[in-house]
Image: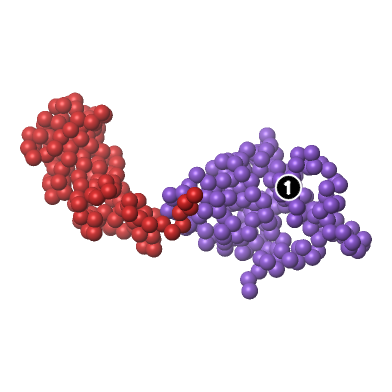
Chain colours: A purple, B red
Amino acid sequence: MGIKGMKYEEFGDNESLELLRKSGSNVFLTTIDDVINWGRKNSLWPLTFATSCCGIEMMQTGAPKHDFARFGMEVYRASPRQADVIVVAGTIVKKMAPVLKRLYDEMSEPKYVVAMGACTITGGPFCELSYSVVNGVDQIIPVDVFIPGCPPRPQALLYGMLQLQRFIETETAESKKKRSASHSYK
Amino acid sequence: MDKIQIGEFIKSLDSDLEIKGGKQFTEVTVPPSKLHSLASQLREKEETSFDFLICITGVDYGHDLGIVYHIRSTKYGHTIVLKSRTADRENPVFDSVTDIWSGADLHEREAFDLLGIKFANHPDLRRLFLNSAWGFPLRKDYIDDDIITW
C-alpha cells in the first residue's frame, strides 16, 4: 500500500486516495466497501495498553486539549475481543513480550497495530546494551503504522492515527482477506 | 562527628582497615572476612550508631567483584561508605547483613540476581527480577546475542 510518508499537501486530497484504490472493480461492491470502510475507520476502538512514558502521552491525547474522541477513538476497551486497534505505547521488555503477543492474538479481526514511540520501533534509547528490551515490537507482532518520537507529541499520535484511518479507507475486500490470512497461524 | 573524626574512630576499632576521605563521605575498605563484625560494631557502638542502611550496590570492577554499602546514622547525621571486594568470580560470597539492617534483604537479592554475588546467611536468597535463563547481565563479561552493533 502506498501510505508511506504522505506529504502534508496530499493529506486532504481526495485524488490521491483514488489512485491508491485498485482500479477496475465492480461499482456495487466498491460502494459497499466504501460504506464499510467509512464505518470502520471512524470508530476505531483502541485496547487499553500502555507500558511507559508513551502511555502518558497517549492519555494526554485523550484528554480535552488534544481530544481523540472527535476522531472516533472515544471508547477504550479493556477486553481485546472488543478492540480494533492496539496502540503499543511504551517499552516492551522481554518479560512483557509473551503477554503482548497473547493480547494481540486474542483480538478479533480486523485488527490493526500502531507502534508508538522509539522504543517500539527499534528499542529506542535502550536498543544497544540493554539486556532486557525487545528491539522493536515488529519482531513480535505485525505493525501497520510507526509513529516516531520519544515520546511523540499528541499531535504526532493523532497524525499517525489519521494515517491509519486513511489506510483503512483504501482497503478492499480482497486486501482484507489477505491481511487476515497473514495474521492467522498455519 | 565529621568526616575526619569518623575515620579516626573506625581506624581505632581495627587498625588494618583502609580509610580514605572521598569527596562526600569517608570510605572504609574492609576485607570480606571482617565485614560482618565491623558492620555490627558500627551499628552498636554509641559514638557511631549507624542504624540506617541507605543502599547496597554490587560492583563489577573488571577483575574483582565487590559491594558498596552507604550507611547513615539518624542520631548524629553522619554517613560513611563501606566497601569490600573479592577476586573470586566463580563463587563470590559475602556475609549478609540482614541481621544487622533488615532493609538489606531485597538489595542483596538484587545483587545476586544481576551480578551473581552470593550472601551467606541470607534468609531467602533467590532472584528478584530475572529468571535463571538470563545469566548475570550486569557483569562485564556478559554476552548478549540481541545487541545491535552498528
Q: Name the residue under label 1.
A: A163
Where is residue B74 shown, x and y percent of the image? 24, 32
> Picture quarter containing residue B70?
top left
> Looking at the image, which residue is at 28% across and 44% down?
B56
Where is residue A160 shown, x and y percent of the image? 69, 45
Quick check: A174 above or below B44? below
In the displayed orientation, state which residue is furthest to the right: A27
> Looking at the image, which residue is at 38% across and 57% down?
B143
Name the subunit of mark 1: A
Q: Nearer the viewer, residue B79 or A146?
A: A146
Where is residue A62 shown, x and y percent of the image? 66, 41
Q: Nearer the viewer, residue B5 or B17?
A: B17
> Looking at the image, which residue is at 24% across and 41% down?
B69
> Looking at the image, which residue is at 45% across and 54% down?
B147
Quick check: B84 above or below A31? above
Q: Mark 1: which amino acid?
A: Gln
In the displayed orientation, state which residue is furthest to the bottom: A186
Can residue B46 be seen by looking at this rendering? no
Q: Quadrant of the N terminus of chain B?
A: top left
Q: Does dot 1 land on a helix, a strand or a loop?
A: helix
Where is residue A19 shown, x and y percent of the image? 84, 52
Q: Which of A7 and A163 is in front in this view?
A: A7
Instruction: Characterize the local packing of mark 1: few (<14), some (14-19) or many (20 or more) Cα atoms within 10 angstroms.
Output: some
Quick check: B31 above or below B116? above
Can residue A164 be seen by looking at this rendering? yes
Quick check: B46 above or below A7? above
Q: Nearer the viewer, residue A94 or A135?
A: A135
